[in-house]
Image (cartoon, coloured by chain):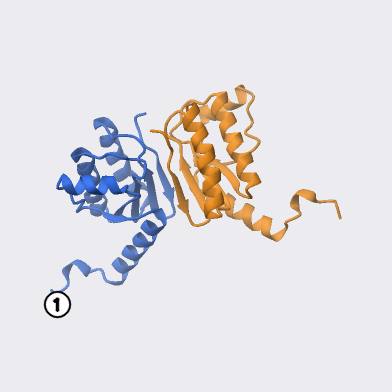
Chain colours: A blue, B orange
Amino acid sequence: MDRIPILRMGQYLLVTIQIDLYDRLATNLESDLVQAVSKTGARGVLIDISALSIVDSFMGRILNNIGSMSKIMDAETVVVGMQPAVAITLIELGLELKGVHTALNVEKGMELLAAKINSAYEDPDEDEAGTE
Amino acid sequence: MDRIPILRMGQYLLVTIQIDLYDRLATNLESDLVQAVSKTGARGVLIDISALSIVDSFMGRILNNIGSMSKIMDAETVVVGMQPAVAITLIELGLELKGVHTALNVEKGMELLAAKINSAYEDPDEDEAGTE
């Protein structure tokens, strides 16, 4: 398989990662996602990794990349469904997934995205608090 | 990978099939889905097959099985994202996917599910029209 499907759901994009992301698959996913955000005007990207029982630094970097790219395109990224063992491994590897938000499952991830998007509308200067 | 993740979204369950369903994977998916419907009280099952570029009679039977099992559990099944080549193959194989509904993409699938579920509430005797 060369591409991971990206599902559009309203203003969100949903991606389920079920297999290990080797180089080309990861590169394709990054470019497909950025293009999908651009084409659909999506405000949020949900990445489900509940099928992954192992994770390495490459996967961590890919998730961070996706988060940063989406952010530039004005979309928030939430990683959901992380298995406890994966969370342990990530921290032991020193990867903190700084570029993305995380939530327990898809429903909570959607709630988080909705909250993020609404708060962005209400307070666009959120990141520059204190500049006034 | 032994299991395909099943994502819960409100009253729907979403499954993205990205790899060929060999025997055990298919059996697991069937039992996992029925259990998920039972546990969550889901009213609809959405199966995205946009990543599948080929399909065989086994896959067709699995989709039909899932549709029939979900129906017994009072949930509708919609298959979405079918590639044109897959549709051609299914018909050439003589498989009509009678147990499931189909829609072009996830959004249209969700609309279809919502319509099916609402009409079921409004007219529970839909299937027995003419018995009055």
Q: Quadrant of residue B3?
A: top left
Chain ID of residue with mark 1: A
Q: Quadrant of the C terminus of chain A?
A: bottom left
Q: Residues within 10 Å of mark 1 (few under 14, many from 20)?
A: few
At x 58%, y 44%, the residue is: B77
Between B11 and B28, the one lying in front of the other is: B28
Residue A6 in sight: yes
Task: Return the residue found at the far top.
Answer: B93
A108 left or right, relative to B126: left
Q: Position of residue B85 (x, y in %)?
A: 51, 27
Q: Position of residue A73 (x, y in %)?
A: 26, 52
Q: Is disc 1 placed on a helix, strand or loop?
A: loop
Q: Is residue B88 left or right of residue A48?
A: right
The total of numbered circles placed on residues is 1
Is A108 positioned to the left or the right of B61 in the image? left
In the image, is A93 to the left or to the right of B92? Answer: left
Q: Indicate the position of residue B2 as horizontal and vertical percent values.
A: 41, 34
Q: Residue at x 50, y 27 (%)?
A: B23
Q: Residue furthest right?
A: B132
The residue nearer to you, when weighing B89 against B77, is: B77
Q: Residue at x 20, y 38 (%)?
A: A58
Camera-side residue of B84 and A130: A130
Q: From where the camera sits, is residue B100 visible?
A: no
Q: Position of residue B93 (x, y in %)?
A: 61, 22
Residue holding disc 1: A132
Q: Where does the N terminus of chain A fall, quadrant-wise?
A: top left
Question: Three-letter amino acid code at disc 1?
Answer: Glu
Q: Is residue A4 above or below residue A88?
A: above
